[in-house]
Each structure stands twice: as C-alpha cells, then as structure tokens.
Amino acid sequence: MKRPSHGGNLAWAASVAGCQASLIVDFSASINPLGPPKSAIEAISRSLSELSSYPDPNYSRLRFSLARWHQLAPEWILPGNGSAELLTWAAWELSQCETTYLITPAFGDYWRALSAFNGKVYKCSLNLVAKDLSEVIGKTQGTKNKGLLLNNPHNPTGKLFTRETILPYLEEFALVVIDEAFMDFLVPQEQESLISVVRDYPNLVILRSLTKFYSLPGLRLGYAIAHPDRLKRWQSWRDPWPVNVLAAAAGIAVISDKDFQKATWDWLIPTRAELFAGLASLPGLQPQPGAANFLLVSTEQPSSQLQEKLLKNNRILIRDCLSFPELGDRYFRVAIRSQKENYSLIEGLAAIF
Ligand SMILES: Cc1ncc(COP(=O)(O)O)c(C=O)c1O
C-alpha cells in the first residue's frame, strides 16, 4: 500500500502495524479527541427522517445560524462539503490572477486545488522563527493582479499570524483567501480571524471548517465567508446540494454548543503544554510552539523511521512530513490527544531513543 500524503490514513497504518485499523491511535490527523459532541449526534439522529428529502439548496437555516454566530447577514456565508470543497472554488478564482502567493510548507490540498485550474504559484517560504508575515512574503512584485492564499493558524507549523500583519495585504492583492480551518481552537480573545473586517474588503475570502474542532471529518462541513456576489457566483457553479441534511443539522447544533467549546479549550491549553514539554525532554526532538491542536516537531532521527517503529511497537500513527518537501524527513507532526494517549506517545518515543 502506498505511503499516504494526508494524515488519517488508518488503512495504510494498519497494514504496517499488522492490526485492525480501529486499534491505531491516530496522531496524524488533527481532530479534536473530545468529539463529536453529543449535540451533533442528537441533531443527526433527529434529522434521519429528512433523508428522504433533498436538502434546501440555500441552506437557509444553517446560513442563518452561522451568520448570527459571526454577526453577519446570511448572504455573506456559503456552506460547503468541508472547507476543501470551497477551497476548490477559491482556487478557481485565484487561478484567474497572474500568480498566487502561497506560504510554504503548505497544506497539500492547496496544490491540488490550484493545479486543477493551472494556477501559477509563487512560493513564500515560512521561516519558523519569522516574527511576522512581512518577513515571509517579502516585497511583492508586479501588478496588483495577484492572489494570496494564507492558512492561519498555519498547518503544519501551528504558527499564528496577527490580524494587523495580514491587513496590509488586502490593499496589495486582488484576492486574499484565508483558510481559518483551525482558528476555533484558540479561545475567542486570542483568535486572529479576519471575519470582523470581511464587509470592508470585497477581495477577502475566509474559509472555515467544522470538521476539526467538532471532530466531524467524515460528515464533511465547512463554510466560506465573503462578499455575497462572489458566493452567489460559486453557488451557480457547483452542484445544488453539496451539504447533506445530516451535516446541515449537525452544523446548526454544534456552533451553539458552548459546553463543548469550553471543554475543548479547557482540555487543549494545558494538554498541549504538557505534550510540548514531554517531546522537548526527548533527545534529538524539538517541538515548535503552536497555536492549534497539533505540534510540529523537528527530529534528528528520520521521521519515517520513527513513524514505522511507533506503528509496529505501539500502534501509534504520527504524521511524517515527506509530503511537505520543505520539511521532509527532519520533521513530524502530532495532534494533541488525551493525556493518557499523549503519555503513550512519549513512552513509545522514549523507548525508541
Ligand atoms: C489547513 C487545512 N485546511 C482545510 C482542511 C480541510 O478541512 P475540511 O475537512 O473542512 O475539508 C484541512 C484538513 O486537513 C487543513 O489541514
């Protein structure tokens, strides 16, 4: 079986570990281990009777709930089949620009989406010690007809860019797409979302995911926030019902689930600090400080070897970084999981060293 280029490929991991996929402890996909929330499961159960009808193609109830949450009008929001679906439409529009500035290493799906439309990419390499975005992007060149695709917080490094450092690029670029798939993991007062300024910038698109924070990657649900004209255009291009009735119902339920949100922040902050300290205490490993629910770790031993040993010895799957050419075998990424599972990761690594 081929080595996967995304996290979360449990069939491949099980074939290496020689066990059932359900026995693998998955640190490779950055999914909240507290979920899915009960509120999602209950909403899905209540909506099973709707399976015999098509979804509302306007997703009015879901849009209304998301809009109320973000204090926007519903026409500024477009739900999608995961944020990955909306990334495809954003990439189509980016590919109409002369070039798209992309911060690398970059989430693999950006390459998929941009290359699908022959988008021209200008790579801006992310120096892990860079303090702000201008150090990464440098001086921009050419006409204003250029796009910027930025992930904040950034996967796989966990780096968070401040709103202030992003704002000047809204004047400089024809189209700015910000993927905030992991922003919910920050407590509200620490988030650096650009949602609050979206009404001022028709060239701004924000992509949000509900699959990571609410642990629903199999359900597929995300949304775009952008000028209503742009979203109407996207809606006219795509199929009429990309979000199924169960996902739409779960979305409405989870965004008002304050208990789950608080429980996640209460778990993440101390648990991430503890995992960071555990990793930093091991020889040859250096975790990078990260704002999201994962940590990027530099390693003296090749990460593909560590990955294989952890799978065979402990049935633990970590994310090697071979699909990020800028990182390669010198890095791996781990999700933050329960305290007990994090201990077993540290023990597994300690045994290898
Ligand atoms: C940075 C980033 N953006 C978007 C996505 C896609 O999320 P979704 O499940 O909402 O399609 C991922 C998934 O790994 C991701 O890492």
Image (tube, rainbow, N blue to C red):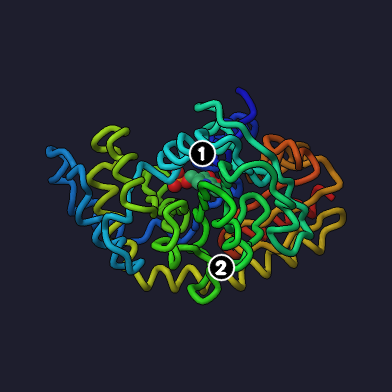
Amino acid, disc 1: Leu
Q: Relative to 134, is 47 on the left or the right?
A: left
Q: Residue furthest bottom?
A: 189
Q: Relative to 118, is 255 on the left or the right?
A: left
Q: Position of residue 42 (x, y in %)?
A: 25, 58
- From the image, state whether disc 1 or disc 2 is nearer to you: 1
Question: Is 167 placed above or below 27 here?
Answer: below
Say few, some or many: other residues with alpha carbon within 10 Å of mark 1 (under 14 / 14 to 19 / 20 or more).
many
* Mark 2 CB lies closer than 8 A to ligand 1: no
**How many marks overall?**
2
Q: Position of residue 83 (x, y in %)?
A: 43, 46
Say few, some or many: other residues with alpha carbon within 10 Å of mark 2 (under 14 / 14 to 19 / 20 or more).
many
The answer to which of 124 and 146 lies nearer the viewer is 146
Q: Position of residue 111 (x, y in %)?
A: 58, 34
For disc 1, the marked residue is 94
Res 268 label: 2
Res 205 label: none
Amino acid, disc 2: Leu
Q: Relative to 282, is 100 on the left or the right?
A: left
